[in-house]
Amino acid sequence: MHRLQPLANGLHTDHPVPGIPFVDDSHIPIHDPAAIEAVICREGGASMGRWERMNEAQGAWLAYTADPLRPELAWAVRHHPEHGRTVLLLLTKDAPLWHSSWRGPKLLFRQGGYWWDGTTWYRPDQAWDATCKHFSLRPVPDATTITAADILDENARTDGGRLLDVYRFDPEAKPPDSWNEHLAMWASQRAADDRPLSQCVVRLSAPELPADQLIGVPKMPKIGHIVAPTLRTYIARIQRELPAGDG
């Protein structure tokens, strides 16, 4: 998991990220973007957060703040009036860059940069259009959106999941086992008027995404003839072109 991946889901997210734990976000005013920005300030009154309205839909906004109990961690929130809210726990130093990546139509990021605009899944930004000066939009062929309702059933265990306290949260801990039980715990704590589970997006499935055909961070340095720290540095900077290797 590289630095710009979220560390955990907030409890009140509508779109949980698979594989990472759930952390209690009840001490953060996730419904109010201005209040999120004002959660914690440095000496002199400078905010350790930010919020802004989005142009693509009336009522859409995004915000982030450092956590008042763990200032090295930050909460990032993306709200859309139609598609709901995502609440993520990040490293504070990565929050501004994540905030920038969330501008525009990109509601969710999954599988290493694949993103969803509420209707269509797109491949990661890699093909640069020099004429239009932006990355080309490349829809994922035969993509299927997987929701919490698709994963959970009436027999899902809720007692196997765990809601973590941010003060005791360990960013270096391994991902939880039996993540579906954690998802069931999350679902059991949702209010009756919350978004239906059939509208809570978890991930996508597509013919091009079988696990046995994907190349992860451990293998890529060998293929590119570079050292692993170099790859991690380029990932952290969101640089899409790697330096030429020695091989």
Image (cartoon, rainbow, N blue to C red):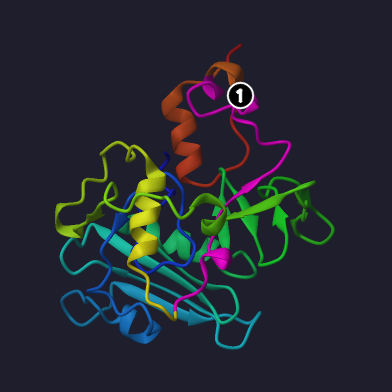
In the rendered image, the quadrant that contains the C terminus is top right
- Residue range in magenta is 194-221
10 Å crowding of disc 1: few (<14), some (14-19), many (20+): few
Front position in the image: 233 or 95: 95
Based on the picture, tell me whether residue 218 belongs to the magenta stretch: yes
Based on the picture, tell me whether residue 57 belongs to the magenta stretch: no
**For the view shown, which residue lies furthest in the top direction?**
247
> In the rendering, at what x and y percent does residue 227 appear?
46, 21
Front position in the image: 216 or 180: 180
**For the view shown, which residue lies furthest in the front direction?**
155
Name the residue: 50% across, 29% down: 217
Asked whether the viewer can see residue 5, the reply is yes
List the residue tagged with mark 1.
Answer: 212
Q: Classify residue 23 by image quadrant.
A: bottom left
Please indicate whether residue 27 sits to the left or right of residue 20 in the image. left
> In the rendering, at what x and y percent does residue 68 appear?
18, 69
> In the rendering, at what x and y percent does residue 122 appear?
71, 53
Residue type at the position of mark 1: Asp
